[in-house]
Image: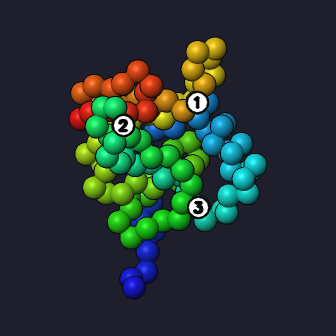
Amino acid sequence: MSEVIDKAVNTSSIVLTDDAVVQLKRIMNEQNVPKEYGLRVGVKGGGCSGFSYVLGFDVQKEKDTVTYSNGIKVFMEKSHGIYLLGMEVDWLNGLNNRGFAFNNPNASESCGCGTSFNA
């Protein structure tokens, strides 16, 4: 098994807004997420438009690209870059929508729920 090397850079292909960072840090504190974990952002097949977003805390894996956005370490599997480069993760706190929102310039269409897209 090869050792995972931290090749983190200071710029991010995925941008976390200030509001998203506040919520992510709150969740990290409430759930006692270990310091070595980062935010995993990815995609998986499914959802009403073809792909769904993956967002959660995880350890770095060998196939990951590691970046930082607003002080949070972000892990993204290299093969997901084609779908996620330039994406912004935001937090909405409105009457109709509350939760993380994905503003993805690579999505050719998305569904009404905002968590599914087609590229």
Q: Nearer the viewer, residue 67 or 33?
A: 33
Across and down, in percent, residue 42 comes to 40, 49
Q: Which mark is residue 13?
A: none
The residue sitting at the top extreme is 95
The amino acid pointed to by label 2 is Gly
Residue 21 in which image quadrant: top right
Choose the circle earlier in sequence order: 3 or 2: 3
**Cα separation between marks 1 and 3:** 21 Å
Q: Where in the figure is residue 12, as x and y percent of width and height?
A: 42, 46
- Residue 62 occupies which quadrant of the picture? bottom left
From this view, report whether residue 88 is shown above or below residue 8: above
Q: Residue placed at 35% from the left, 48% from the top? A: 44
Give the side of residue 34 with respect to residue 118, left or right.
Answer: right
Q: Kindly report which numbered mark, 1 or 2, lies closer to the viewer in this rendering.
A: 2
Q: Which residue is mark 3?
A: 37
x 46%, y 38%: residue: 15
